[in-house]
Amino acid sequence: MSAFIKGLLALRRGPWEMLATILIALGVVMLMQPFALVLFTYSFLVTLVGTVMFIIVSHFKE
């Protein structure tokens, strides 16, 4: 099993913060793309979930 998966399962801060950051970036990309209305529709929700997730996981242990 990779170190990333082990970190997620052990509730370590690093991998979870990386996942939250990826969600935030994905939401911003979804917001700026002009092709699919469905992606634009859910962009705010994805960004919000990533932001709340980042706030929560910043309290996890190293």
Image (tube, rainbow, N blue to C red):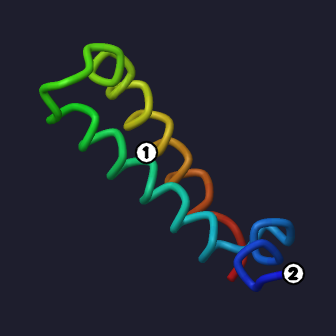
> Looking at the image, which residue is at 34% across and 24% down?
39
Question: Who is closer to the viewer here, 2 or 36?
Answer: 36
Q: Is residue 48 above or below residue 21?
A: above
For mark 1, give the secondary structure: helix
Secondary-structure class at tag 2: loop
Residue placed under numbered mark 1 in the picture: 51
Rendering quarter of residue 33 = top left
Tell me residue 12's x, y (percent): 73, 74
- Quarter the C terminus occupies: bottom right
Amino acid carrying label 2: it is: Met
> How far across and down, in percent of the image, does residue 41 sit?
32, 15
Q: Are marks 1 and 2 in contact (CB under 8 Å)?
A: no
In the image, residue 38 lies at what x, y percent?
Answer: 35, 15
Amino acid type assigned to the residue bearing label 1 in the image: Thr
Q: Is residue 38 above or below residue 12?
A: above
**Which-is-in-front pick, marks 1 and 2?**
2
Taking the image as shown, residue 30 lies to the left or right of residue 4, namely: left
Among the two numbered marks 1 and 2 on one chain, the one whose residue lies closer to the N terminus: 2
Residue depicted at x 15% and y 35%: 32
User: What residue did someone put label 2 on?
Assistant: 1
3D distance between C-alphas at marks 1 and 2: 28 Å
Q: What residue sits 51% from the left and 68% below the top?
A: 18
Count up the numbered dots.
Answer: 2
Residue 7: image location, x then y, percent: 76, 76
